[in-house]
Image (cartoon, rainbow, N blue to C red):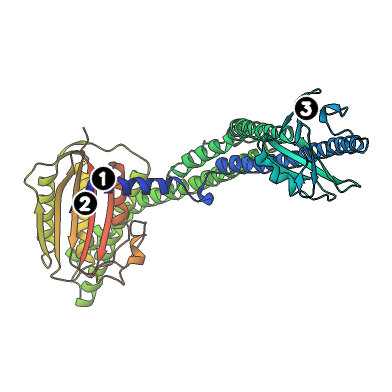
């Protein structure tokens, strides 16, 4: 007993992939491109038209040819019966008999003599006896009968004479069949050629007609990639005039898109002018506030040194000092953002990140001792092109943010590792209560605060993370947030630079 050969698993896998590929190639009609839909719809309509026209032509030609054959058969039958009435039964003696005409005389259910077929105008030949049975079964009725005989297909008519003899007359129907077959071949050939030509020409025409849509798509794609949310935006992309003719259907879409882009460009310019004025005002106001704030701090220090204050006075003076310091910090933050908004170049230099992280975390340990500060550093050196002061401020802001918005005893871990040869990741992670999901999307916006969600001890301005975001962007990096209860991590990815 023979065993079936084992199926190669790799072959089966390849066959499965091939079936999946074939199924993917035949997409739903709704997933086809507009160009393909239009071409296929045109070809389907043309196919239907060709089929209907071909069917009508075939039916008309068949009717004409059959009517002509029937008329010829009636004429031949009339000649044969007239000759029989005059005693002429030999086909060669009957005038006007065409080649292939069949004559038979049936008497008492059998053929009298031989069945005669005209081979030429002057001779006849006998029909094989195997076909005689087909002829004797024909009754004299007012219709024509088709028979497949050995010598070809015949259409016959039977006429009963006064003496009881049935006179059979037949004509070859091969010419009708051949003509109709040739007509079918011609219809198929012409229709197929027309469909192929229509498919090619239609594809070219539709492709040219739809070409402006590709230009519209290219313009829309470029605009969609522009950073329109902030900063000065130059929206110069427009649909070419050749694809924005309002007199055509596709061109009207391009024309409308250009008008929309003009409107958006004007709105962006208005937004930019407004933002510029606001930023200039903030920068000017911050500069102007520096002097009075410095004076307030100086006078409070002088007052404490020169006057004997009561406990309530000392408390009030301390509040003035703390609030002036808080206001001063806000002013400095606003000035930092103003400088970043102006796009002033950073002072880039080789910066050793490991040393910078160690120094900054040690400073935080001294300044805020009620949190546990940990390090997660790689032994590899991390040298990047960066503004050391700005990167230090990024880390300080992230560490201060973790300290302010978490409970005493929270562990804050600062990490530094290499993502790849071109990118270094600086991370700050804490095991605090986390940041609500609905707030995470706006956390880097200016004056964005969620003090109610994280237990903090000191009020915040809502500018710290905005500064972090702006500095990281100025370095060509990005900052991301991953937060859930018990694990909040800010990840800063910075390019190493050259």
Confirm whether residue 249 shows in the render. no
Between 209 and 444, the one nearer to me in the picture: 209
Q: Which residue is mark 2?
A: 4
Q: Is residue 237 visible?
A: yes
Task: Using the image, tell me which numbered label, if any, was put on residue 99.
Answer: 3
Q: Where residue 193 appears, x then y in whole percent?
A: 62, 30
Front position among marks 2 and 3: 3
Tell which circle, 1 or 3, labels the residue nearer the N-terminal end.
1
Residue 87 % position (x, y): 90, 35
Distance CA(mark 1)–CA(mark 3): 66 Å
Q: Is residue 465 left or right of residue 169?
A: left
**Disc 1 marks which residue?**
11
> How far, Cα to Cα, is label 2 from label 1?
16 Å
Q: How far across and how far down the image is residue 6, in percent?
A: 20, 50
- Disc 1 residue crowd, few under 14, some 14–19, many 20+, Cα 10 Å: few
Tell which of 119 and 185 is nearer to you. 119
In the rendered image, residue 5, in percent from the top left (x then y), is placed at 21, 49
Question: In the image as oriented, which residue stretches furthest toward the left?
Answer: 379
Disc 2 and disc 3: Cα gap in Å? 66 Å
Give above or below for 309 relative to 92.
Answer: below
Would you say the residues marked 2 and 1 are in contact, meaning their CB atoms lie under 8 Å apart?
no
Please, what secondary structure does the residue beneath circle 1 have? helix
First in residue order: circle 2 vs circle 3: 2
Closer to the observer: label 1 or label 3? 3
Q: Secondary structure at mark 2?
A: loop
The picture quadrant where one finds residue 315 is: bottom left
């Amino acid at each position: 007993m023979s065993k079936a050969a084992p199926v190669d698993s790799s072959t089966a896998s390849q066959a499965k992939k091939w079936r999946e590929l074939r199924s993917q190639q035949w997409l739903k009609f709704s997933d086809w491109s507009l160009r393909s839909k239009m071409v296929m719809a045109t070809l389907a309509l043309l196919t239907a038209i060709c089929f209907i026209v071909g069917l009508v032509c075939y039916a008309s030609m068949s009717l004409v040819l059959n009517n002509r054959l029937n008329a010829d058969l009636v004429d031949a039958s009339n000649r044969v019966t007239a000759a029989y009435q005059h005693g002429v039964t030999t086909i060669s003696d009957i005038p006007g008999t065409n080649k292939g005409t069949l004559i038979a005389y049936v008497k008492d259910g059998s053929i009298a003599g031989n069945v005669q077929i005209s081979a030429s105008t002057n001779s006849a030949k006998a029909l094989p006896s195997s076909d005689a049975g087909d002829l004797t079964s024909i009754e004299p009725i007012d219709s024509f009968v088709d028979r497949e005989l050995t010598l070809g297909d015949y259409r016959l008519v039977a006429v009963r004479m006064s003496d009881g003899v049935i006179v059979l007359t037949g004509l070859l129907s091969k010419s009708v069949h051949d003509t109709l077959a040739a007509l079918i071949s011609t219809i198929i050939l012409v229709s197929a050629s027309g469909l192929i030509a229509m498919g090619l020409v239609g594809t070219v025409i539709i492709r040219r007609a739809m070409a402006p849509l590709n230009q519209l798509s290219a313009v829309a794609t470029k605009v969609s990639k522009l950073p329109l949310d902030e900063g000065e935006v130059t929206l110069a992309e427009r649909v070419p005039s050749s694809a924005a003719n309002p007199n055509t259907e596709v061109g009207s879409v391009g024309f409308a898109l250009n008008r929309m882009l003009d409107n958006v460009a004007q709105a962006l310019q208005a937004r930019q002018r407004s933002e510029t004025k606001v930023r200039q005002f903030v920068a000017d106001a911050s500069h102007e506030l520096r002097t009075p704030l410095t004076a307030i701090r100086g006078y409070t220090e002088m007052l404490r040194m020169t006057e004997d204050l009561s406990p309530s006075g000392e408390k009030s003076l301390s509040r003035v000092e703390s609030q002036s310091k808080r206001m001063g910090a806000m002013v400095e933050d606003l000035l930092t953002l103003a400088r970043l908004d102006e796009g002033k170049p950073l002072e880039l230099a080789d910066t050793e990140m490991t040393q910078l992280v160690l120094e900054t975390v040690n400073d935080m340990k001294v300044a805020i001792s009620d949190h546990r500060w940990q390090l997660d550093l790689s032994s590899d050196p991390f040298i990047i092109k960066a503004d050391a002061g700005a990167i230090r401020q990024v880390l300080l802001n992230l560490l201060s943010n973790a300290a302010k918005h978490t409970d005493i005893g929270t562990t804050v871990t600062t990490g530094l590792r290499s993502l790849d040869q071109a990118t270094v990741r600086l991370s700050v992670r804490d095991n605090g209560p986390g940041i609500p999901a609905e707030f995470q999307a706006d956390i880097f916006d200016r004056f964005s605060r969620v003090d109610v969600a994280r237990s903090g001890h000191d009020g915040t301005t809502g500018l710290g993370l905005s500064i972090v975001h702006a500095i990281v962007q100025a370095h060509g990096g990005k900052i991301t947030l991953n937060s859930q209860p018990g694990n909040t991590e800010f990840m800063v990815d910075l390019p190493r630079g050259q």
